[in-house]
Amino acid sequence: MEIKIRDWRLDDLTQIQRAWLDYCRNVCRSDMKLRPDAKSAMRAWLLARFRQPQSLGLVAESEPDVFGFLIGRIDDWESVPPVIESRRIGIIDAVYVSENARRHGIGSRLIESAIETMRSKNVVAVETIYDAWNDASVKAWHRAGFAPWMVYAYRML
């Protein structure tokens, strides 16, 4: 099966929405619950993101099936407090590969394609957030060259 990586299209949003919400339903911890309006909220967010010029969306497909996606953006990073010069960074908000297509390098290809696009737009660094408790996720991001910089810690009460 040949997987093609391409830019997202408006007609991809329904499949992305469905896959992302299914993923959220399956990985939510005990302190997380989907909102009753999650479906419409996700649709509105995806549509708004799709229309933003700084957004980046990639889809992994073997027509007519979509096997994965990446959503990111390019932004100017500002320090808090504002003492460090701003810099142009890429942010990868989500990478998803359907369960039946995992372990075939699709996620890596999506990440590398996003990085190349970001590099061509003068991004100096790329950041993401991933689940530190998911070994497969940690390994995938480390293979892609990502390493912890600032740690966002969480404590359940």
Image (spheres, grey):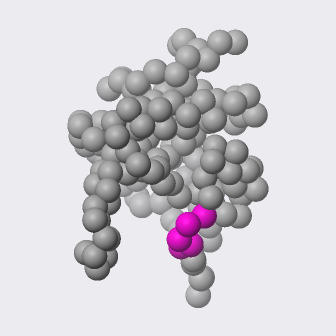
Residue 7 image position (x, y, % from top left): 41, 24
In this picture, is 103 found above or below 89? above
Residue 43 image position (x, y, % from top left): 34, 42
Q: Residue at x 70, y 45 (%)?
A: 143
Toward the viewer: 73 or 15? 73
Quadrant position of the N terminus in the picture: top right
Q: Assess whether residue 124 is covered by the magenta stretch.
A: no
In this picture, is 57 found above or below 22? above
Q: Residue at x 66, y 63 (%)?
A: 132
Q: Quadrant of residue 103?
A: top right
Q: Is residue 10 left or right of residue 36?
A: left
Q: How many marks?
A: 0
| Residue numbers of the magenta segment | 148-152
Q: Is residue 39 visible?
A: no
In this picture, is 40 found above or below 150? above
Main secondary structure found in the magenta portion: loop
Q: Residue at x 55, y 37 (%)?
A: 111
Q: Is residue 107 visible?
A: yes
Q: Is residue 48 left or right of residue 58?
A: left
Q: Residue at x 55, y 25 (%)?
A: 60
